Image: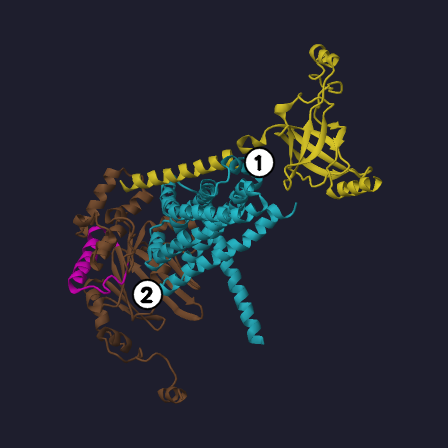
Amino acid sequence: MINRKIELFVGIFVALAIAATLMLALSVANQGMTGSGETYKLIARFDNIGGLKARSSVKVGGVVVGRVSQIYLHEQDLIPVVELEISSEYKNTFPDTSSLSILTSGLLGEQFIGLIPGFIFPEDLEMIEEDKVCETTSLDNCPYLTNGEEILDTKSALVLEDLIGQFLFNQGNE
Amino acid sequence: MTDKLNTTISIDAMKFTRGDRTIYESISLDVKKGNITAIMGPSGIGKTTLLKLIGGQLYPDNGTVEFLGENIHQVSRHRLYELRRKMSMLFQSGALFTNISVFDNVAFPLREHTKLDEDIIRTIVMLKLEAVGLRGAHDLMPSELSGGMARRAALARAIALDPELIMYDEPFAGQDPISMGVLVKLIKSLNKALDLTSIVVTHDVTEVLSIADYVYILANKRIIGEGTPQQIQNSDSALVKQFLQGKADGPVPFHFPATGLEESLMGAK
Amino acid sequence: MIQMLQKLGRNTISTFSAVGAASIMLFGAIFAAPRLKNIGLTVHQMYVVGVQSLLIIMVSGLFIGMVMALQGYTILVNYGAEGSLGPMVALSILRELGPVVTALLFAGRAGSALTAEIGLMKATEQLSSLEMMAVDPLRRVISPRFWAGVISMPMLAIIFSAVGILGGHLVGVDWLGVDAGSYWSIMQATVDWNEDVINGIIKAIVFALVVVWIALYKGYSCIPTSEGISKATTETVVFSSLAILGLDFILTAVMFGIN
């Protein structure tokens, strides 16, 4: 009798803990259970990354599609290189003419990377259909961004001091 | 060799110290199979320690303790636990598990060490409780028992696995005359009925002399007298006499060792 | 001078031997091969240390979440950033308050009880009598309590965090009028499962190990008298609390400090 009561209470306890974990996973934390899905890597060089950090998000029109995995300085060129992890959900989605810019959410918010999808030439679309260029082992001719590819069109972060400087310079000119 | 077979416990030249204090200098004693052996001595002499040494809970500095011919302090841990199933101990406080009922207490060693059905366990437990006269109290909690009943319940638990050796630690301490009489009778009858070997550690002289087959008297870190109750009572050792007759002062001094009284009083300033 | 050095030496030796004895006990408790029967014992102990701590943990979590929201709101509203209330409450509870406060309460509620229980079992010779019944007290008494504590405390910490965040919602959204959508969505955007939630749980597991270890060792090694038990119980709470706070700093430095 007593044992049954104890087991019941322990059962309730465990159920509560599971419910709490689920709540933390689904409505508190961002990636939740699906967080560690498959990704592919993209590289981009910026002149200035501003306050961008590893784990900052990559968004397309506000939708999170990936994260910054690491940031380092290019050994020869001495400019920052940013590695992105994009969810495999978005494989063969973004054309290689897409561009990146470092944006800020709100006035005091954190910085993130905005990805603006480019376009695909109609003849490239035919190539995808007919030659299956995105399904062969060598993806060089694939018009989409693929694993390890570099995005060439990047816009640096806006640095407040530079902006003010520019503003003053322009004023001086007038 | 025949002697070996009939000896349950054999202690040889055992020395034991705790910290800086020597408890035993060199003790040798034998417990014969089927006997009730009494170990007597003034309180604070380390009688409980002796039982713990026999049970393998403490380790001597020197000398050996053999149980059924095996050195209890040199066998493997596994073997020690096997040997302990053949012995059991009745603690001074009873040491019943306070969170389970009397029935479950007695059933505890059976459930731990055997794979018997619950029905059989129930039968055994009821028989053991019947033997100590507590069958009616089986569903009480230990806190609801009187001191004497708790000790009898603990005794039922101690004999649950039918051990070969049972050690009683001060079974008569703090008991009213009736419970004491009951316990004396129980120890005697259980020893006979279950073919047990018993060690009774106590300082209640009259009770234990009435049931013991052989008596050792411990004092001053060694054995000061041994023999059958008859021999002990006729002993002419001053120490033994002091103990048996309960004189306040004698070879065992009334005063705890101290500097002279005068000195202490003067020193108090 | 020599006496002082001798005293220092003696204290050092006794400290080391205590840590050694505690480690041996811990080792015995962890590796005492769990038997089927002992799972029942562990469940029973989960009731004692877990379920019976549930109420105090949930009430504390609720109030801490509510206070966090109230305090946070009064500051954030000055910068028009009350939308960040969600992440502020969630992050501070998940990373710090959840594990730490739960562990402190757990040490006071369950740790002290464990010490006192085992100390009393020792004083009433129950541990000795187990040994004489050829039942290993480490396996029968210590091990189930150890596992029950180590399993229960992180669960309590998770429940604490969840209740705390709900408490923050109660004050922030229902009372102070922060937009419910922004409370949850900005929280979701900021809180990271691995970085924040898992690290908080790791902290809780570490604290659980330490608290239960200290509590069991203090009970197991106490002097079996009433003063001995009361001293051991006090020491359990004091040592556990200090260990929790000290370890929290180290863990925080390792997890979040260097980036």
Chain C: its colour in the image is: cyan
- Which chain is rendered brown in the image? B
Magenta span of residues = B168-196
Q: Quadrant of residue B56?
A: bottom left
Mark 1 falls within which chain? C
In front: C178, or A37? C178
Q: Quadrant of residue B149?
A: bottom left
Q: Which mark is residue C207?
A: none
Residue A1: x %, y % from top left: 26, 40
Residue lying farthest front?
Answer: A174
Identify the residue at the far left of this view: B178
The residue nearer to you, when weighing C195 against A115, is: A115
Amino acid beneath label 2: Lys
Chain containing mark 2: B
Q: Visible in this render: residue C25?
A: no
Judging by colour alone, the chain drawn in yellow in this rendered image is A
- Look at the image and say whether residue B189 sits in the magenta stretch: yes
Report the disc number at residue C189.
1
| Position in image of residue C110 (x %, y %) | 40, 51
